[in-house]
Image (cartoon, helix red, strand yellow):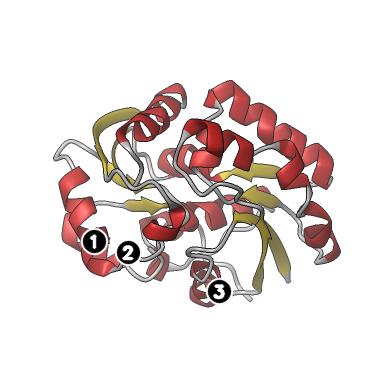
Amino acid sequence: MTALGFLYPGHSAEDDYPRIEQLLGSDVRLDVVHTDIGEDAHRPDALRRMGSAERLAAGVEELRMAGAESVVWACTSGSFVYGWEGAHDQVRTLARTAGMPASSTSFAFVHAAREIGAGRVAVGATYPDDVAGLFAEFLRAGGLEVTGLKGAGIITAAEVGTWGEAEIFALARQADTADADALLLPDTALHTAAHITSLEKELGKPILTANQVTVWEGLRLADRRVNAPNLGALFTKEPIVQV
């Protein structure tokens, strides 16, 4: 059994994790610990407080006790808002505190895009335009070309968590560009696990979503490779693991 740890801010789309665990169909356990979201606002100052070392450290002991082999800060905006170097400092501190390999959803997007060979990406973000722009800057710092950026202007994770299939597909269609190798949908507050393959069929390209890449990153850190086509093209790049 491989146990992966996730620090998830507040409560919005955490039910994506048991869904993903089921879709993995392997001997992988996803342990989610909720961190203090503080002020629920997609504003740089609030997001930096949400991703502070103190708030992340508060959930680490529970994951250690659960036997986690890696830990991922399951928040996109609460990592890229620090910038490329600041986000590296964030996960280095988390790794030292946890005593295990660590990463964040922002880095997961960059690593996942590289894994599927997507050098050009379009972004459909639930965030206000200024915060969405910070994510685009982060991706560019990671060596990716951003071909299009669409922000939805939503302030709170709570509102994002209420979105269903219709809203997600509308954002994806608006954000996609013909020259993008993949479409990225950041925000771990967005329920996407049930829609990835349908989105890929609709747009004809790989779709990377926040909770999906977060789990993939946890597996990568634990040196596990799981083939799970129901989680999209990202999970067909790895060899099948015999259980």
213 versus 88 height, above or below: below
N-terminal-most mark, 3 or 2 = 3
- Could you tell me residue 68's position as x and y percent? 76, 60
Q: CA distance from mark 2 to mark 1?
A: 6 Å
Q: CA distance from mark 1 to mark 3?
A: 22 Å
Q: Which disc is residue 19 wearing? A: none
Q: Which disc is residue 163 wearing? A: 2
- Could you tell me residue 76's position as x and y percent? 50, 43
N-terminal-most mark, 1 or 3 = 3
- Residue beneath label 3, please? 18
- Looking at the image, is mark 3 or mark 2 nearer the viewer? 2
> Which residue is most to the front?
39
Closest to the observer, 10 or 39: 39
Secondary element type, mark 2: loop
Q: Determine contact: label 2, label 1, CB under 8 Å.
A: yes
Residue 67 is drawn in which quadrant?
A: bottom right
Residue 121 is drawn in which quadrant?
A: top left
Badge 2 amino acid: Trp
Secondary element type, mark 3: helix
40 versus 120 height, above or below: below
